[in-house]
Amino acid sequence: MSETRSASAPHSHVFLGADHARSERRTWAVIWLCTAMMIGEVVGGLVFGSIALVADGMHMSTHAGALLLAALAYSYARRHAEDPRFSFGTGKLGDLAGFTSAIILAMIALLIGYESVSRFLAPVPIHFAQAIPIAVLGLIVNIASAWLLAGGEHHHHGPRAHGPHDHAHDHDHDHDHDHGHDHGHGHRHHAAHRDNNMRAAVMHVLGDAAVSVLVIAGLLLARAFGWLWMDPLAGIVGAGVIASWSYGLIRDTGAILLDINPDPHMAERVRAAIESDGDRVADLHLWRLGPGHLGAIIAVSSAQGHGPGHYHARLAGFTGLSHVTIEVTRA
């Protein structure tokens, strides 16, 4: 049979990252920077008759659009964090935005690669006096954007337990909610803790910065030695770098959206803690609720006759478990 416990006070399902508010503010700041740069380049290009400057301004608009997606995801997740329509909160919205941004990055990589191959097959004249300063200016803006996105960031890696709060339901389940900040993993970026929305935003500006560096090098070599093929070659290498980053982001965010176990080691530790005195874990599910927050559903077959509170106490030291459901059946 299953065991229940008396119900406790209503609990929150807010599973946003520890740096959510600051990340939202930094993203909006970079959007305003990119927008100002875009307007300046387009207006300047039209006034001074530079089509290259106009083209770079339009290119900047694609990154502003991608960053806008990230900012809107932060804002929506914050505003609807306690909306009861979201069964486990809005913590995954950033991963959805990151997945979408990764698709955009892949499309940008394809466009850069296509344009570069086209220029290999049909070279076009290069106006070095305009192209090099524009590439340098773009690099400066991207470095400033990356600095704004990452500036002053403190590395929080998830919840720290404040003690279990057990909740009973008609279907004999208990819930444990632990909130806080976990520093047990040091400063390494664990899959269960990283903010994929911010990661996608940083990838956009760093990808553009990497392409700018390659383009500057290609243009300088092309001007110095007449190697016009260096410019499209730099574009192809840059497209490959962006495609690689895009693939990694699609893989990681897709796994979260499909509720793949983000921390197999944690799952094994949980299983070992429950089974340490002869009980058996009949079923165990672990998934990510948001940056730094994990959910777990555990079915225990107990030979000792313990109640759910006994197992909650055993899991109290597991940082990162923010929503735990335990069902106990007597063996």
Image (cartoon, rainbow, N blue to C red):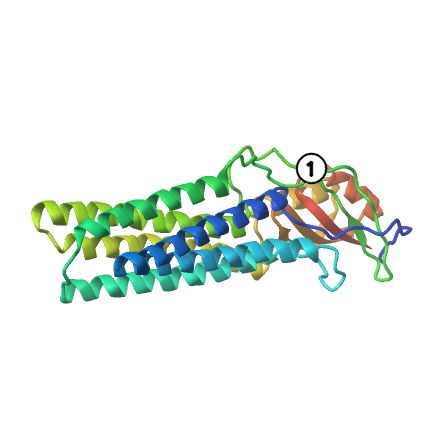
Q: Secondary structure at mark 1?
A: loop
The quarter holding residue 236 reads: bottom left
- Count residues near mark 1 (Cα–Cα under 10 Å), then give few for <14, some for 14-19, many for 20+: many
How far across and down, in percent of the image, does residue 48 sit?
27, 56
Left or right: where does residue 91 sit relative to residue 12? left
Kindly identify the amino acid type of the residue bearing the numbered disc 1.
Arg
* Identity of the residue furthest to the left in this view: 225
Q: As rendered, which of 297 and 159 lies closer to the eye? A: 159
How far across and down, in percent of the image, does residue 230 sit?
16, 52
Q: Is residue 162 above or below residue 175?
A: above
Figure quadrant of the C terminus: bottom right
Mark 1 highlights which residue?
Answer: 160
Q: As rendered, which of 45 and 82 lies closer to the eye? A: 45
Question: Can I make out residue 49 in this image?
Answer: yes
How far across and down, in percent of the image, does residue 217 sit?
21, 45
How far across and down, in percent of the image, does residue 190 sit?
53, 43
Left or right: where does residue 98 sit relative to residue 319? left
Residue drawn at the location 87% of the way across and 54% of the way down = 4
Residue drawn at the location 21% of the way across and 64% of the way down = 117
